[in-house]
Image (cartoon, grey):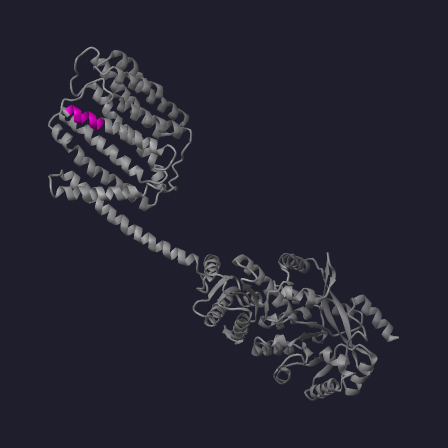
Amino acid sequence: MWVLLGLYLAGLLLDSDGFSPLVNVWIGVPAAWAPAAVAWLAAYRARDHWALALVAMALSAFAAGSTYYVAALAGASSLPFPSPADTGYLLFYPLALGGLFVYLLPVRQRLARSVLLDAVVGSLGAASVLVVLLSPLLSAAGGFSSLATAVAVAYPLLDLIVLAVTAGMAAVPGLATARTGPTLMLGLTVFAAADVVYASMLATDAYVLGTPLDAGWTAGLCLIATWADGFARQEEKAQGTSEGSWTPAVPMVATAAGLGVLIVGTGIPVPELAVGLAAATLVSAGIRTQLAFRQLVTLAEVRRQSRTDELTALPNRRALYTDAPAVLEARQGAPCAFLLLDADRFKEINDSLGHDVGDRLLIQVSERLRRCLGPDDLIARLGGDEFAILLLDAGEHEALQLADRLRAALSEPLTLRGIALQVGVSVGIALFPEQGEDLKTLLRKADTAMYRAKASRSGRHVYASEDHSPGEERLRMLQELRAALIEDQLVLHYQPKVDALTGEAKGVEALVRWNHPRHGLLAPASFLLLAEEGGLMNALNDRVLTLALDQAAVWHSQGRPMTVAANLSASSLIDAELPDRIAAMIKERGLAESALMVEITEDFMMPDRVRARDILSGLQSRGIRVAIDDFGTGYSSLAYLRDLPINELKLDRSFVVSMTQDPRAAALVASTINLAHSLGLTVVAEGVEDGGALEQLGSYGCDQAQGFHILRPVPAAELDDWFTVSAL
C-alpha cells in the first residue's frame, strides 16, 4: 500500500502536465484500492468487528468513485457535476463516521463525564473555527436550490463534521495517546484537508488534475487503513485510562478558539453558525470547569478521608507514613521521640462487651491522648488499639514524662454502657536520631520497646541496644497457643493446701501448664501475657475451669471430695455471664458448689471495683467460694477486705519466705492472720519452703499452707500417690 502511494506521488511530481493514464489510471487506481484491501483484511481478522467493516466500506466507496472519475476522464475532457463518482465520494463520509461511532461506542461507556465534556468542547471549538475558514466555500456553493448546489455544499459540511469529530477524539485519553490512535486522527485530518484545498482551488478555477494534491486523499486513506490494520492486530485497546500530556490542551485550545471566533465576530462578519458553535463551546467549557472544580473538591475530600481514621478522626497510618518522614527530614537532626502505644486487654473488652463499646472506648482514648499533646506533635491511629506519637523537640526524659502523663490520663475510669473501665496502656519509645533516622526504623524499635514494656509490666520502656525484636517468635507462639487450646495441649498441675497444724489436705490449687510441642512443659509466666495480648484469656479461663472441674469429678467419684481452686484473670471482670457459666459447669458434673474456689488477684478489681463486686457476689450467691491471691503486694488490700465478698485470703510468698529471718515480716504475717480471722476469713500461706516456717505459721493460727516443703505442683496422678502416702 505504501509502495503504491510512493509510486503515485513520485509519478505526480515527475509528470505534472495534467492527466496521465500511466500515473492516474495504472498507478493511481491501485493506490486508491490498496487501503480498502488492507481495511478489508483487517476487518476479516477482527471477524465480528463492525467498526472496521464500515471503515473498509468507506474506503471502498471512495476508491470506486476515484476509479469511475479517472476512467471517465480518460475518454472525455470533463465530467458533469454531480456524477456517479460523487456518489462514491459522498458515501465515504457516513460510512467512515458510522465506523468511528461503532468504534467509540464501547470507549464512551467507560469514559467519565469530564472526558466526554472535553471531547464536546474540542469538537465544538474546532467546528466554530472551521465554519469561519470554510465560509467562502459554503458561500460559493450557494444554498440547496438544486442537486448540484446541495452536493457542492455537502462536501465542506461533511469535512467540517469529520474534523470536528477528530478534534473531539484528540481530547479522549487512550485515543490520543494510544499506539495507532494518532494515526487514525492524522488520516482523517489529511483527507479532510485535501478536500478543503481542492474545494478552494476549484472555486477559483485553479485546480488541475495530475498535481501532488491528488495524492492527498490517498495518503489520508492509507493512514486510516494503517490504523485499521493495527487495531485488528490488537496493538491498541483504547482503554481510555492513560492521560497524554497533550490531551488536556485540546479543550483549552478549543475554548480559546471559540472565544477568538466571538471576538473576531465583533469586528468582521462571521457566519451565524460559527457564532452559535463558539457560544456552545464556551457554555460547554463553563460546565466542564464547574465539573472540574467539583472533582477537585471531591478529590480533596477523598484525600482527607484517606488520611483520616474513620472512627477517631485522628490521622491514620497512611498520614503518618506521609507526614512523619517530611517532619523528621525538616528537623535536621534535632531530637525527637517516637512513641508507640498499645492498650492492654482491649480485645477482651471488645469481645465481651461488643464492638460498639470497643469503638466508643477507642474514641475516648484518642480524645485523652490528643489533649496531652502539643499543637505541633503528630499522633496517628495505626489500627486496632495501637497509636503512634511523634514528639518534637524531645529526648528520653521528655518522652518518659509524656508516657507517664498518657498512662495517668487513661487510668481515670471511662464509663461505657454503665461500666467504669480503666484502660492500661504500654508505651514503647524510640529516639531520633540516635536510635533511627527514618520512620521504619523508629517504628520497629518502638514496637520492640512496647513489647518489652508489656513483658516487664512497667508500662513504658525506652528502646535499648540489648533489646531484641520478639515479633516473629511471638506471632508463632500466639498461633501455637491458639492451637493448644483446641488440641488439649494445656494441662493442670495441682498443689495441695494442708492444715497448718495437722498437715491434713484441705484442698488443691490448679496451676496451668502448656505442654508445648517444641519447648516442652511451660510455666504460666511463659504464655499468660501472650494470651492477654492475643485475646485468648477468656478461652484459657474456660479451659482451666473445665480441666479442674473434670478432675474434681474424678476425685469425687473416688470418694475424695476435694475443693479445687482455679485462678481467674483480670479480664474476667467484664464477663457478666461468668457466675452463671461456672455454676452450669459445676451442675453438669454433678458436683457441689463447694467443689470449686476461684482465686483472683488485685488486678481483678483495679479496672472497675463495682463490677468486680457484682461478679464476686454472683459467684458467692451460687455457693462458689472466692479467694484473694498474692495478698499484700498491692496498695488497696484493706479496702478490698472491707468491700468485697471474699472467703479466703492467701498471703503472698514474699512475706512467708522471709518470715523466719525477719521479725518485721513475721509481725506482718501474724497481724494479717489476726485481721483476716476477725473478718471471718480463712488464711492460706503460700511459699512454705521449710518445716520451721510451717511450724511458725501454725503458732500464729494460720489455717492452711502450701509450698514446696509440702509438695510442688504435680500432675493429678502424682498427687493421688501423695494422698495415699499421706494417709498411711
Q: The N terminus is located in which quarter?
A: top left
Most extreme residue toward the top, as rendered?
A: 75
In the image, is residue 198 part of the stretch drawn in magenta? yes
Q: Is residue 527 left or right of residue 708?
A: left
**261 w.r.t. 83: above or below:** below
In the image, is residue 689 part of the stretch drawn in magenta? no
Q: Position of residue 91 (x, y in %)?
A: 25, 25
**213 w.r.t. 451: above or below:** above
Q: Position of residue 304 (x, y in %)?
A: 40, 58
Say which quarter of the image contains residue 679.
bottom right
Viewer-closest of 438 and 446: 438
Magenta stretch? Answer: 195-202
**189 w.r.t. 573: above or below:** above
Is the magenta region chiefly helix, strand or loop?
helix
Q: Position of residue 477 (x, y in %)?
A: 66, 59
Viewer-closest of 454 and 205: 205
Res. 196 in view: yes
